[in-house]
Image (cartoon, rainbow, N blue to C red):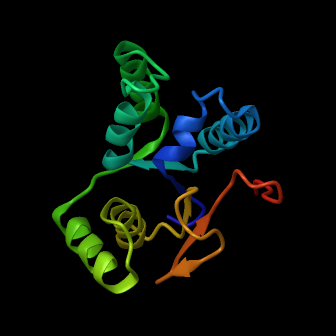
Amino acid sequence: MNGKILLDTNILVYIYDPLDRKKQDRAIEIVDKLIRTNRALISTQVIGEFFMATTRAKRQLLTPAEALQRMRNYLAACQVVDVTQLISLEAIRGVETHKFWFWDAQIWATARLNQILEVYSEDFNSGSIIEGVRFTNPLTDDFELP
């Protein structure tokens, strides 16, 4: 899956979060380009987290109906990777070996076991490479979309 990018939930959520316009604009640009070039990947974990993050009561970004429509759009526009039993087991190893939080470990394991070489996320140390998976924060000022 060379050239494909696994998007973490936070990148998708920023598209709908007007609190930080700079990050919002950047997320829109990045996701749009990855979808147009057929390089965007999401996991079933990401799509579920997206619904929860955008519809939570404390700071609702989308209504449930709006979130469901966006989810349908992402499921149609991006390649979707299922979270499997093997990914869950690898995530456990990621927690033990690399001290990830479980949900972050599951993102890492999804990428690693599907030979996805890069993850776009704010939740990891940008530029780090862990067992062949590179983590990039595409919302930083110095990031240039390839």
Compared to residue 51, the image places residue 102 above or below, namely below
Q: Quadrant of residue 88?
A: bottom left
Q: Residue furthest front?
A: 58
Residue at 29% across / 82% down in the picture? 96
Q: Closest to the observer: 3 or 20?
A: 20
Q: Position of residue 32 (x, y in %)?
A: 65, 36
Q: Is residue 81 left or right of residue 124?
A: left
Relative vertical location of residue 63 with respect to residue 11 in this rendering, above or below: above
Count the marks: how many?
0
Task: Name the quarter where the C terminus is drawn.
Answer: bottom right
Q: Position of residue 31 (x, y in %)?
A: 62, 40
For the point 29% across and 71% down, the residue is 91
Where 51 falls versus 145 (above or below)? above
Q: Nearer the viewer, residue 106 or 100?
A: 100
Residue in the picture at 37% in, 78% down: 99
User: Quadrant of the rendered structure where residue 92 is?
Assistant: bottom left
- The residue at 70%/40% (across/down) is 23
Residue at far left of view: 85
Image location of residue 140, percent across then percent down = 75, 55
